[in-house]
Amino acid sequence: MPYVLLQSVNMNIAGGNTAFLLAWIGIFLMVALAGIGSAVGTVMGGSASIGAMKKRDDIFANCMILSALPGTQGLYGFGAFFILKEHITSSINILQASAIFGAGLIMGIVGLISAYQQARVVANGVESLGAGNDVFTKTLILAVYPELYAIIAFATCFLISGAIPALV
């Protein structure tokens, strides 16, 4: 059933070029999933900040910095879009398209999960700041760990992009 649906969409939208369609689906997943993760993550951090600032309004600057951290995954997804989109042409083959699809899936899923998990670390740190604990620096350091995996996914997109011309 999914193959029939994909084939129908392919014939109607992509003019019968399955590789072209597959590559753009990968790009879509990359930008959408990483962006959704960042949107959810920044909302979690912002919500925790509002709650903490009800107790202590002098921590706004620290809360703002911590709440912004999960937003970077969306930027990585957007940056990888510019790295990979140059390879998508009407003459793209299925092997090149599969590489772009895979890179998009890696960046999208890792961006989504790392932004959510980073937001959990940030929200806990912000709540602790609101309770009067001096944990800004420690929260910042601990929140960077999930970020590392988003950076690795972004670097993977860059490396896959470098390998695509050889897949002719």
Image: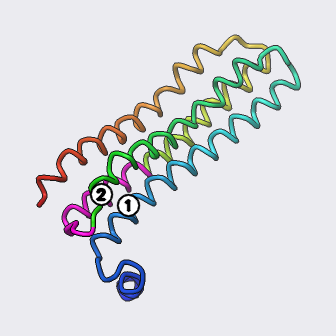
Amino acid marked by disc 1: Gly
Q: Residue 10: give x, y in percent of width and height.
A: 36, 81
- Counting residues from the N terminus, which is met first, the one under dot 2 or under dot 1? 1
Residue at point 31%, 45% (across, down)? 157
Residue 154 versus residue 144: which sits nearer the camera? 154
Instruction: Specify the quadrant of the image occupied by residue 48.
Output: top right
Look at the image and say whether residue 114 sits in the magenta stretch: no
Residue 75, disc: none
Above or below 15: residue 64 = above
Instruction: Specify the quadrant of the image occupied by residue 167.
Output: bottom left
Give the secondary structure at mark 1.
helix
Q: In this view, does 3 lie to the left or right of 65?
A: left
Above or below 19: residue 110 = above
Q: Which contiguous range is marked in magenta?
A: 90-108
Amino acid marked by disc 2: Ile
Give the secondary structure at mark 2.
helix
Q: Residue 58: give x, y in percent of width and height.
A: 82, 14
Q: In this view, does 114 lie to the left or right of 17?
A: right
> Which scheme is used to colour this image of the protein?
rainbow
Residue 100, disc: 2
Above or below 110: residue 24 = below
Residue 87 versus residue 71: which sits nearer the camera? 87
In the rendered image, the quadrant that contains the N terminus is: bottom left
Instruction: Give the labeled residue for mark 1.
Output: 26
Above or below 114: residue 22 = below
Q: Whole-Å distance between the Cαs marked 2 and 1?
A: 6 Å
Q: In this view, does 27 lie to the left or right of 119?
A: left
Query: Of helix, strand and loop, which mostly describes the magenta segment?
Result: helix
Look at the image and say whether residue 91 sits in the magenta stretch: yes
